[in-house]
Image (spheres, helix red, strand yellow):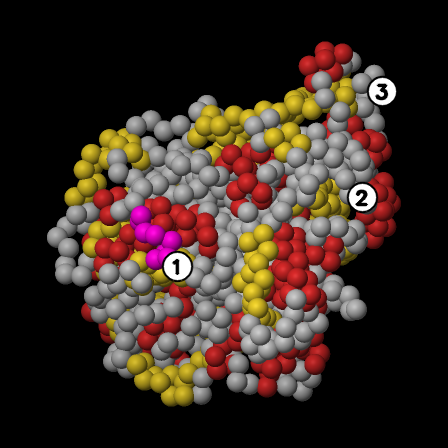
Amino acid sequence: MKDISKAIHKVDSDEKISGTAKYTDDYVMENMLYAKTVRAMVSKGTIESIEFPDLPEGYFVVGPEDVKGENVVNMIFDDWPVFTKKAINYLGEPLCLIVGPDKATINAIIEAITIQVKEEPPTFDFTDSATHRHFEKGEPEKAFKDATKTIERTYETGYQEQAYIEPQGFFGYPENGGVTLIGSIQCPYYVKNAVMRSTGLKEDTVRIIQADVGGAFGGKEEFPSLMACELAAAIQKTGKPVKLIYERSEDMAVTTKRHPSKIKMKAYLNEDNTIKGLKVHVSLDGGAYIGLSKVVLSRAMIAVSGAYTFTNLDVSGDVYKTNTVPNGAFRGFGAPQMLFAIEMFIEHVAREVSEDPFAYRMHHLAKQGDSTSTGGTFRDPIILKPMIEKAKKASNYDALRRDYQNKDVFKGIGMSLFLHGCGFTGSGEADIIKAKVKLKKDEQDDIHILIAAVDMGQGPKTTIRKVVSDILNLPIEKVHYPNPDTLNVPDSGPTVASRTAMIVGGLCARAAEKLKKDYVKGKEQTVHETYVQPKEMEWDEDAMQGDAYPAYSWGVNIVEVEVNKGTYQIDVLKMTSVYDIGKALDEKIIEGQIHGGQAQGLGYGYLEVMNHKNGRIEQTTMTDYIIPTSVDMPPMETYIMDNPYALGPYGAKGAGELTLVGGAPALAKAVEQAIGKDIHKIPLTPETIMELMHHEKN
Amino acid sequence: MKKTEFTLNGKAISLEKDPSKRFLDVLRNDLGLKGPKEGCGEGECGACAVLIDGNIVNTCILPLANVHGKTVTTIEGFSETRKFEVIKEAFKDEGGVQCGFCTPGMIIATESLLNKNPSPSDFEIRIGLSGNLCRCTGYELIIKAVKLAAKRGEGLW
Amino acid sequence: MVSQIYPTTLEEALHYLKKETCHIVAGGTDLWVKHRNWANTPPKFKRNLLYVAHLEALKGIKKENNILSIGAMTPYETILNHPATPDILKACLMELASPAIRHVATLAGNIANASPAADAVLVLVALDATVEIANESGRRIKNVKDIITGPGKTTLEDDDLIVNIRIPLTPFTHTKFIKVGGRKADAISKVAFAGCANVKDGALKDFNIALGAVNSTVVRNIPLENTYKDKPLSELKREKEAFLNALSTSIKPIDDQRSNAQYRKRVALNLVSDFIDSL
């Protein structure tokens, strides 16, 4: 049997390379109308009146009164309206759409709209907690009382914008008494459920089709549901096809971003200076609406121990409502914020008690059998030690770490150790998603993979086809996996949380095995599989106790930098990494995911700056929001170490987010060595570095 | 100025359109070519790029007037060439395609680079691609693909 | 809807400029960003448009005596590849924007756009470049430094057209261009430095120091430079702090979405200091 990891050509490369792949804006239809969003111009206020100019024939206002079902975007929290009626809670909040056949006319109509708003004082600081969570491990109160020493630090992280190269958009038309929407999305069923709720349409009249997606990274997880609800109302009102594509600056100003965070870490030490326990508080800026921020908070809190084991934990967190753009999913989903904090903190603690940071971290390193932060168990082998050895050797870490201690050399090398929980947090898979997959064999004995998983570049179209074709011993050309269409596929869950290969791929593998056993040549056969929670997994959602995830993937990142003495700019010289993702379903695809995730992780650490000023996002162009170019990327040496997971297809675990979460702390540690100062905040801009080096405040 | 005349993918085109119209809009809406894409509308991401007289140009900030008398090749036209085949195979072999949105622009950038520099170094490849933003790949496998294409395409450029 | 003129000759262009107030369109890369509108709607121009990028009379690079004469509509890429182009200008153009922009953008466009962060303008000022300006009545030559007066502001009249950029080919022994942007390519300068020096037999023959993006126009203090010209280099090195202090009074950067004033000022002075150290 051939090794599944061996790379094959991705099955969708041809159309993407030749420019024939069909993205949302490529769809055209006769009599198609365009839609543009009319938005609030203040961060907080109440709408007193909206006056529209006389509309020419064929032009429509589509607003809250046109939402025939519930004026709410179905997300985990029900606070986000499709169109706001009176209350404005953030700058750019949608008030209505203007829809019509000519874009210039739509622009003119929007310019002629007059809106009377009573402005109210907005909130930007962390005072209005919309959700508070807390969990403990061990006996923190007792432990903290007995502690010989405490060390306290606070860490901050900023916005991160997904900056997918394809802006958000949908195209839809009336069909079958309802609506059909084609969009740049990660979660066809999230969209379907949202549209059913906002339109009141029944299940069989709402159809969602995934167009080819030009990048998503979480930004197209829940946000598209808002656009879909608005568009559905427009299609129902006009009875025509309607296209809604965001302009880049619009997309950057109003779509969900990574939650900015402020994390307070307090370590309680034993007499031998090791960590007895941690008391941690996580503050996330949720923006105007909570959406799925509660889940982001959960993941952040659960990641509190990072790659380590601590006996006692007192972890709390709040999502604060502010009058800014609502924040949401972005690859990592709370983990990047927390991993930055714990990775920096453990070294800061070590240095403060004059311990060698590396040895200190090794002392606390998690082992198989340890209890997790939430009192679950690391049941599977943890191979961090050999991974660290490999990474150190490949990067020449020990020698360089020694050499760069020289104060006259502005170079540094830093190492981050981290994990990522694979799949939905806690009982999400079993209680909320309940994933279903379908495998159909037609009379020509071609196999059709019917799942809702979206290939947005990360390759499931190739990897899951590989899995199924390998099990059934068929050439891959006989296995089909089209873009999901809710008309044809069951709900296998959203394409998020590093669950697609492990959970959905796993279900497809089981279905393929079943089909193999019952295979009848020339006969149409269908196999269904539904997710079953591993029996040892127990999770108490309210107490946040038990096994938060069925499996964990692990990583080691080593980043080497040079800081320019005159300009304070960071030159990333090299990045070396080793990952345990169980088993690669395709080594080239994983390699690509590693490079891309690392680029985003590094960007998060030092390049990607986004702030708001009084609720207005200051960087709303690709010129002002700096993502790495080809010239910015360092050489990357990457390794995968196999550690097969029994319940994953061919041993595969989650990989999608892991490769982003370790970059920023590794980079920050390297910069700390280069400039000889402690770092508590990212992004590490040259301006910040200058301040640190000269003790200047701006 | 009444008519804008140019060669597009080998064919002579004559258009009577607003000369200030973005060439990207002309391609996508008047000429039905969807290969060039709108990623940013400000000449920053390269997803809209085509070849003008063999050089990469961003069409989202290119007025139709400035295309008059030029030879334009979009990804559609370029994909009919032998050079494209070499580049395509290299991109497939190296795994340089993820979501694909930046890819046509990257192919155009590759051709523009190799036209001038048939054997570029790694750094020269990075510079050649510096105006094409990719969010998925971290560029590494794209650079490898360009290197491989240059090696295999000896004599073509 | 504005009028759009596509002249077939330079004379025609100058004639139109006399009659109507126009945006003069070179490569269009600044104008089409500044005036951009929703996809597939006309850009938001309020002035008429005069397209000149195609005029052959405005293209070409010639070396006459010791002046490099660059036609206003010569794209950056062509200038970059020309053997006579001074190294410092090459260094600047190599990092300017991206290959796609460099294939159509021009020096004339960079000058007329007059952004305080304009990189090509910075180097032209450091090189004491001049421009030849034409209108229907005649031609005149002006220093690049003198025609830019503020962000987006030049002394060019509505009927003026830049036809030529003229760079004196001074044999400098040391030239340096440093761009400090948000990333290594495809970035707008937070601070930029252009320095040219001619050190001969221990004496400083030429000493041009220019800074970009740290004031509303390029910072260059020629009287200050002149106090060290034709003097021993050691004098400049000894009085480096005094030089930096004097220069710093012209360094008045702003805070914006890209950077802050404190950073820009300190880095600008660091770059000047490093250049002096390198001589």
Residue C20: x and y in percent read 21, 67
Task: Name the residue: 44% across, 30% down.
Answer: A321
Start-end of magenta stretch: A199-206
Q: Which residue is mark 1?
A: A207
Q: Is residue C249 left or right of residue A62?
A: right
Task: Name the residue: 50% across, 73% down.
Answer: A19
Task: Name the residue: 83% across, 16% down.
Answer: A271
Asked which secondary structure carries label 3, the reply is: loop
Q: Amino acid at mark 1?
A: Arg
Q: Amino acid at mark 3?
A: Asp
Asked which secondary structure carries label 2, the reply is: loop
Dot 1: within a 10 Å radius of its alpha carbon, few (fewer than 14), some, or many (20 or more) residues?
many
Residue B118: x and y in percent read 65, 79
Farthest top residue in view: A145
- Please say whether residue A204 is one of the residues in the magenta stretch: yes
Q: Which residue is mark 3?
A: A272
Q: Amino acid at mark 2?
A: Pro
For residue A196, say whether it is visible. yes
Mark 3 or 1: in front is 1
